[in-house]
Image (cartoon, rainbow, N blue to C red):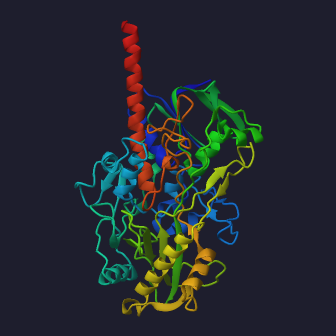
Amino acid sequence: MTQYDYIVIGAGSAGCVVANRLTEDSKTTVLLLEAGNPDTKPEIQIPAECLKLLGSEVDWGYFSEPEPYLNNRKIYCPRGKVLGGSSAINFMLYIRGNPHDYDHWQALGNPGWSYEDMLPYFKKSEHQQRGSDAYHGVKGELSVTDLPAPAVMSQRFVETAVAMGYDYNPDFNGSQQEGAGFYQFTIKDGKRHSAAAAFLLPILQRPNLTTITGALVTRLLFEGTCTVGVEYLHEGTLHQVSVNQEVIVSAGAFDSPKLLLLSGIGDAKHLKALGIPVVADLPGVGQNLQDHVLVPITYQSTQAVHPASSSSGIGEAGLFLHSEHNLDVAPDLQCFAGPILWAPPGSNRSGPGFFGVASLTHPQNIGSVSLRSSEPKDTPMIRLNHLQSETDVQTLVVGIKLLRQIFETHAFDEFQGEELAPGCDMQSDEAIAAYIRDACDTMYHPVGTCKMGTDSMAVVDPELRVHGVEGLRVVDASIMPTLTTGNTNAPTIAIAEKAADLIKIARYVSKQRLLAIARH
């Protein structure tokens, strides 16, 4: 079998970064396996056309199981099936989260993951349009830019929120997160700057990097509990490759636990029921699924309010806030506003419109990912359990009422058409709550299914090594013990930056030990 020093599974936000950093050493060989295809679809590059990517050939197009707290609806869960992973189909917002998020990770028993520890990794990746300061870097590969010309209604949203008493916040990733302002985006020269565009495409010619697309990894290979390689399906043929150092699983919060389970790492009862030999009994694999939830409010517009250019994102303006009675350190609501018609499901409305979204930053629901069968081509079973908590529903009621209050000010008189959702007849808290259960959706930010920690449900340790086996790490959003406050792409890239350093340090230490043994 062909052998590599490292095998990275998944060329998404994390995998592209890890492959880049490990191959900086010309003597280190890396195989990067991606189940999707090259990122040649034209719409990938056009920020304003990101909605066209959902449900296309570059999207796995997963759905949850019927959700018991959402009137048994199946929730659409898109994931990138392409180089760049979900960073090639997302809405490109650059949000790091709240410093408290990372301090909390450390307090849960993960030394080295505080905000102070993570800030250098955010700065390392970043090429900030505004320049360098205490919170931002300019030497990184990932372009972070302002909107060239926010739509008028987006400007009105920010102005109105500030007039209502919220702070104006010019930088959600700076000294504070609360307040109203404009989002920054991972866009470069008017085009989407995915993890593939930033970290992978510039290095594809490195002779020590081998990248294979259309390669579905079917299982990890073990000798006892030592990871020795992987098996993957490519163009109808099964291949096996061996690894000299480590396998790094970066397949995302749905597919990383799926691969571990297919390979015999997970809850022993679940594995035995499917006839999968147990390599390591880790009951936490696939558990602890967390995701942001959102509910929209939508208006028809009396005039065109579309983005000023094709390099605009969808949600241009934002607001982070603490809802009523929320005493947490981090905001519990994140709002978006944008100049497009977010038509309600089943609606045939079209034309100009604008929307707001209320999103829970730390919902109380915990879901899971499990196997449907032992067949690698089967989709994972996803249970989100959105709105399991009535407290979450009431917080979203606060968010919808706030957005309605903003949009019904005189600042929006020139645009204001019919309220399509929830609808002007939905005024009481009870009516809004019923609408929320009908309209609640995911923010497409799944995390936590291979969580980091040292407790009985942890899957990886603070160095992201899988408990109970050797030579295996998980590096992606699935290792987050808890959700970050806001969009998850930037945190995933920072996780990968830190992981690459951890991997390099581990190899250096191993070499020094071998040299010491040889000397004696």
Q: Position of residue 161 (x, y in %)?
A: 35, 80
Q: Position of residue 238 (x, y in %)?
A: 70, 34
Q: Position of residue 5 (x, y in %)?
A: 50, 27
Q: Position of residue 59 (x, y in %)?
A: 61, 57
**Is residue 21 placed above or below 132 in the rendered structure?**
above
**Is residue 328 placed above or below 257 in the rendered structure?**
below
Q: Residue at left 55%, top 88%?
A: 428
**The C terminus, quarter of image:** top left
**Is residue 447 placed above or below 472 in the rendered structure?**
below
In this rendering, position of residue 336 left or right of residue 239: left
**Is residue 342 placed above or below 228 in the rendered structure?**
below
Q: Residue furthest top?
A: 520
Q: Mark yes or no: residue 310 visible.
A: no
* In the foreground, 62 or 331: 331
Q: Mark yes or no: residue 68 visible.
A: yes
Residue 2 occupies quadrant: top right
Residue 339 occupies quadrant: bottom left
In this rendering, position of residue 267 left or right of residue 413: right
* In the foreground, 371 or 281: 281
Q: Residue at left 39%, top 90%?
A: 409
Residue 170 occupies quadrant: bottom left
Q: Residue at left 36%, top 59%?
A: 98
Q: Residue furthest left?
A: 133
**The N terminus, quarter of image:** top right
Figure disc tally: 0
